[in-house]
Image: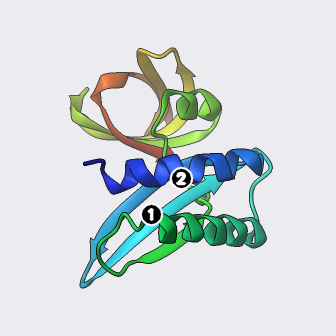
Amino acid sequence: MKKVTHIVEELVTPIVTHMGLELVDIEYVKEGKNWFLRVFIDSPTGIDIDQCGVVSEQLSEKLDEIDPIPHNYFLEVSSPGAERPLKKARDFERAVGKNVYVKTYEPIDGQKEFEGLLTAFDGQTVTVEVKVKTKKKTITIPYEKVASARLAVIFS
């Protein structure tokens, strides 16, 4: 049996593609007593609430047709926000030149968390320029060691 997120991806991809949008991520999680199906969409120019509404309505119709979820859940369609997750290689490629927050599976130079400017991504390594006190330091992280990453909003 396919996972709910895979089924939803198959249903929502044609909808967002037709609208000129990008599917960023899908989450299916239980929080407290409630289940949530969250679909994150975006475009190079951003998205608005009307686009989220259209995707939500069309996806809801498709989900009602095949009914892949056996219990009640809340469907949420939204932008990934300013601190969008970086999950795929193309996300890292687009984020070069932007501030990021990266967690690793194991320590690199004694640390597992890095925040700074993503200066390069070559498919094998993620290069982040971090500030250590008043100096800048370049950290090269093997891509397979990245546990999670997201864009970072840094206030200065």
What secondary structure is marked by label 2?
helix
Question: Circle 2 sits on which residue?
Answer: 11
Q: Position of residue 137 (x, y in %)?
A: 45, 26
Residue type at the position of mark 1: Ile
**Element at label 1:** helix
Residue 22 as seen in the image, left or right of residue 67: right
Answer yes or no: is residue 118 visible: no
Q: Residues within 10 Å of mark 2 (few under 14, many from 20)?
A: some
- Residue at position x 70%, y 44% from top? 17
Q: Is residue 121 above or below residue 134?
A: above
Q: Find residue 66 and name its label.
A: 1
Q: Position of residue 1 (x, y in %)?
A: 25, 48
Res 141 label = none
Quick check: 136 above or below 154?
above
Left or right: where 93 falls relative to 25 = right
Which numbered mark, 2 or 1, is in the foreground of this view? 1
Mark 2 or mark 1: name the one nearer the start of the chain: 2
Looking at the picture, tell me which residue is in the foreground, 16 or 43. Answer: 16
Residue drawn 38% across the image and 78% down it: 73
**Image check: 19 left or right of 128?**
right
Task: Mark yes or no: residue 116 visible.
Answer: yes
